[in-house]
Image (cartoon, helix red, strand yellow):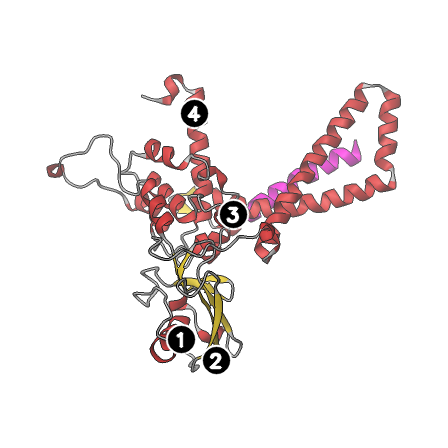
Amino acid sequence: MVLKVFRYRPERGPEPYFDEYEVPYRGEMVILDALNYVKDELDGSLSYRWSCRMGVCGSCGMMVNYKPRLTCSTFLREFYPEPVVVEPLEGFPVVRDLVVDMTGFMEKLQAVKPWIIRRHESPVESGEYLQTPEEVERYKQFSMCINCMLCYAACPVFGRDPDFLGPAVLALAHRYNLDSRDEGWPERHQAIAVDWGLWDCTFIGECSVVCPKDVDPAAAIQREKVARTTDAMLSMMLPFGGQP
Amino acid sequence: MSGPYPLYVPKYPRSWWLRKGPYRRFAAREITSMFSAAVSATLLAFLFALSRGPKAYEAFLRLLDSPWMIAASAITLTALLYHTATWFRLTTHIVVVRVRGQTLPRGLLIVALSVAWLGASAVVAYFHVWF
């Protein structure tokens, strides 16, 4: 079976190109197995990220036949006997071959403060912040993100402007805003109500389609918009801005 | 992470919305929303004609009866039906309805919204046709 792989080797020149490799086909092989075969047996210069090989670490996301996929859970049999095109995730700068630059994503991730924020921290001796199963259920789906960035590769808003905070980061902000232990939404809102933030999502919805963990970032973003609009309206209508 | 070598930055095409089926459907959803503005403009023109007296009102009705206006109305109706259907599909992603601790399935919400929509349309049609 033929694997057509995107190559960018900056020491060789500024333009990318494609290399074709013939890999043995077995029904249980995934794209990542085929790439490992290429690396081990055919061309040791091929660069790509991978780690867990079981759909948990989120490292091996690539464009497979022009769709963002985790290569560890995309089987060759889905495409056999046709050739498969493997490219780096769309919308990101390419460091080398199939490796994309994650710097911008990591900075955005930190910017939304994805941790529990309390107005007043309780001392450790006072015990845990307790939650009911219903309170966990409110945000659990949005906490399943593995930061694989497939949603970014599917998002044309991010594609057109790499400054857009993007689906995974906005969904994560929503996840913490939904958490009953958290009191940091005004602080987090400062980070997401910016140019190329929450309000720039046009709800194309492909982020949710490609998400391998069913996080549904598109829903998270729209629900965050509704929550913040409701807050804004209430603060306008209630005495003292609705603050106790 | 730029390192000693330059990054390759691919260009994202302006025509992205034509590239894939889901993107084309998104573009269709957004474009069809403009037809609701056209309906509002027509209603405003209708009220304006009404305010100018019976002659202007009759003239406006004749305009609405013209073949090209009927064709435009048919196109508008088709566009709005598409837009409404996609709107319901999207709304159910956003709205979470919980009954006795259970979240209602999206399919049920789509059915409920569609029934409410058909009901409202039937009421409008009833007043329009029989009054």
Labels 1 and 2 touching (C-beta < 8 A)? yes
Disc on res. A234 = 4
> How far across and how far down the image is residue A150, in percent?
43, 56
Mark 3 / mark 2, whichever is N-terminal: 2
Viewer-side label of 4, 1: 1
State the residue position of label 3. A160
Q: Is residue B91 visible?
A: yes
Residue A223 shown left or right of residue B36 in the figure: left
State the residue position of label 1. A34
Label 3 is found on which chain of the structure?
Answer: A
Q: Main secondary structure of the magenta part?
A: helix
State the residue position of label 2. A1
Where does the magenta region start and end? B109-131
Rendered position, A37 above or below A191 = below
Labels 4 and 2 touching (C-beta < 8 A)? no
Amino acid type at mark 4: Leu
